[in-house]
Amino acid sequence: LVSRKEKSEDTVININNELVGAGAPSFVFGPCAVESYEQVAQVAASIRDKGLKLIRGGAYKPRTSPYDFQGLGLEGLKILKQVSDEYGLAVITEIVTPADLEVAVDYVDVIQIGARNMQNFELLKAAGAINKPVLLKRGLAATIDEFIHAAEYIMSKGNENIILCERGIRTYEKATRNTLDISAVPILKQETHLPVMVDVTHSTGRRDLLLPCAKAAIAIGADGVMAEVHPDPSIALSDQQQQMDIPTFDAFYDEVLKFMKQYEVKA
Ligand code: PEP
Ligand code: MN
């Protein structure tokens, strides 16, 4: 169902009037994790001031260590909902269990399935049965074929609104947190009719690589870019190394817009 052979036109996903996959790149910014109302609201103000429409933030955080911050859960979803209403933004947030999915649909606009759950087939099937778009991330060590099959699980249950997100894969390279597989973008766009985004934060794990990788993503035809922004990354409860503070975010976005203008990318 996700195959280009089944449907030749690009799937366009309408998230509160932000059209993902319609030609102009979409941008998803926001903190790694929801920590407080003030923290999310500060980032939301900066996103809104840029005329952008989407915000991300994790309420359920799948962490490597059980002793690390696990997210605020339902309280985090409530904060996201309040901020999104106040700032006119649509929320993208990760959900990790089918039971939480049922609760989350009332609070958020897009359900994210994270890299660690790309082959959680019960979660994929549950996401296929809801009436919200799903942003599906590539697994830590998933082949492109496995990634496409994971999307097929969702669509096979009836949900056609799926955004694929390349977020880097595990390789022997240690200079970056993961290896951004930039060629996955055109392959996924050839093989499927779904929009494809690139998460420059989790793929690189390096703040100094966010801008060049965002440019590469746009240049290669990605439908969107995701990156993490926190009012004060030095005290963030997760991903301190890679989130942008707000002045860095402002400069990053200015440079992205300049790049798009220079190469006449539809904005
Ligand atoms: C995230 O986007 O918050 C996240 C945990 O990313 P990933 O699943 O790609 O590691
Ligand atoms: Mn993160």
Image: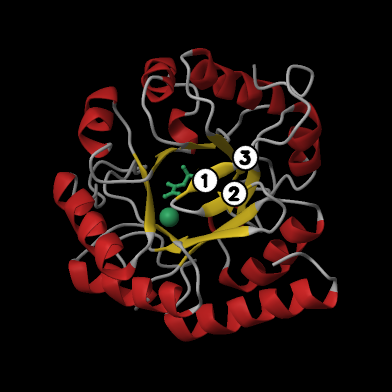
Labels 1 and 2 touching (C-beta < 8 A): yes
- For disc 1, the neighbor class at 10 Å (few under 14, some 14 to 19, many from 20) is few
Question: Is residue 132 or residue 204 the one in the foreground?
Answer: 132
Q: What residue does disc 1 label?
A: 14
- Rendered position, 233 above or below 119: below
Residue 225 left/right relative to 95:
right
- For disc 3, the neighbor class at 10 Å (few under 14, some 14 to 19, many from 20) is some
| Residue 148, percent from left and from top | 65, 24
What secondary structure is found at the residue carrying circle 1? Answer: strand
Q: Residue furthest left?
A: 75
* Residue at the image point whose x is 52% and y is 16% from the top: 153
Labels 2 and 3 touching (C-beta < 8 A): no
Q: What residue does disc 2 label?
A: 20
| Quadrant hosting residue 105 | top left
Residue 130 left/right relative to 136:
left
The yes-or-no answer for disc 3 within 8 Å of ligand 1 is: no
Q: Residue furthest right?
A: 263
- Residue type, mark 3 in image: Arg
Q: Mark 3, mark 1: which one is toward the viewer?
A: 1
Q: Residue 170, labelled with which disc?
A: 3
* Residue at the image point whose x is 57% and y is 51% from the top: 19
* Disc on the earlier residue, 1 or 2: 1
Q: Residue furthest front?
A: 17
| Residue 23, percent from left and from top | 72, 53
* Disc on the earlier residue, 2 or 3: 2
